[in-house]
Image: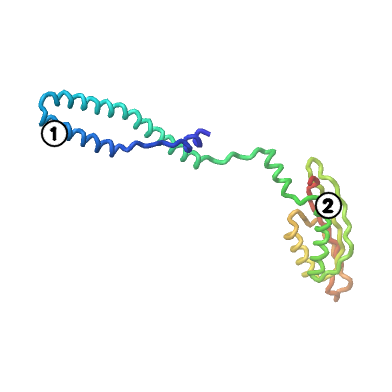
């Protein structure tokens, strides 16, 4: 890029202070020569003065060019810092969205998580039934999970909340509750979840 080329370019700044000092010393020497040698030295002094004028006039474009290049470098540096990042295309954003879903191969681990969390929350669970089907128009698979559990209402709520937090692509699809007797603290529940997974690796 042009900015990188300018950044790599080494600009050797002339030492104008040293040049000015040298010219002042040269002028003083000329004055001493003129004082001692008379008119022949005057001619030589005029030649030297004209040479000095030529040097100064020749270096002026160089100084202006260096100043212009440095100014351009500063402007490019500021522009590069202020440049907004390019927005991703809709196709790229869509691919990134689907890539955020767990892969289909993680389903066994997700089912184990359901059972482990049930036991952790003092629920008695049995084998979960599940069915999966492709989600039309997407690279996703929708898995419907049906699992019966038994326990208190508080433990049931805690279990469901933990699962929804642990498995972000899991949603609660249905809940059926039944109590066997008025004095029974436990509920028989049939819980239905839906889990979205990515079919591609």
Q: Pointer 2: what residue?
A: 143
Q: Position of residue 25 (x, y in %)?
A: 21, 36
Q: How crowded is the residue under tag 1: few (<14 C-alpha within 10 Å), some, or many (20+)?
A: few
Residue 55 higher or lower than 151, as above or below = above
Q: Position of residue 193 (x, y in %)?
A: 81, 56
Asked if the residue under mark 1 is in contact with the one under mark 2, i.e. CB atoms within 8 Å, the reply is no
Residue in view at x 28 percent, y 27 percent: 57
Residue 145 higher or lower than 133, as above or below = below
Residue in view at x 54 percent, y 41 percent: 84
Q: Quadrant of residue 167?
A: bottom right
Residue 158 higher or lower than 26, as above or below = below
Is 64 placed left or right of 8 in the picture? Answer: left
Q: Position of residue 101 (x, y in %)?
A: 74, 50
Q: Quadrant of residue 161?
A: bottom right
Q: Position of residue 92 (x, y in %)?
A: 68, 40
User: Number of callouts in the render?
Assistant: 2
Task: In the rendered structure, find residue 75 and report the number of the disc placed on it.
Answer: none
């Amino acid at each position: 890029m042009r900015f990188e080329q300018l950044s790599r370019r080494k600009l050797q700044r002339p030492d104008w202070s040293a040049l000015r000092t040298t010219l002042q010393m040269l002028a003083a020497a000329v004055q001493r020569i003129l004082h001692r040698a008379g008119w022949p030295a005057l001619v030589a002094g005029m030649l030297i003065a004209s040479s000095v004028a030529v040097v100064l006039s020749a270096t002026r474009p160089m100084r202006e060019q260096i100043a212009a290049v440095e100014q351009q470098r500063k402007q490019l540096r500021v522009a590069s810092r202020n440049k907004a990042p390019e927005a991703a295309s809709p196709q790229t954003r869509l691919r990134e969205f689907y890539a955020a879903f767990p892969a289909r191969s993680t389903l066994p681990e997700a089912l184990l998580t359901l059972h482990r969390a049930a036991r952790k929350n003092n629920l008695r669970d049995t084998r979960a039934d599940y069915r999966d089907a492709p989600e039309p128009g997407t690279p996703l698979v929708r898995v419907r999970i049906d699992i019966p559990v038994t326990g208190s209402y508080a433990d049931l709520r805690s279990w469901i909340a933990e699962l929804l937090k642990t498995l972000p692509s899991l949603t609660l699809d249905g809940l059926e509750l039944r109590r066997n007797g008025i004095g029974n603290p436990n509920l028989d529940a049939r819980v239905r979840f839906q889990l979205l997974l990515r079919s591609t690796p």
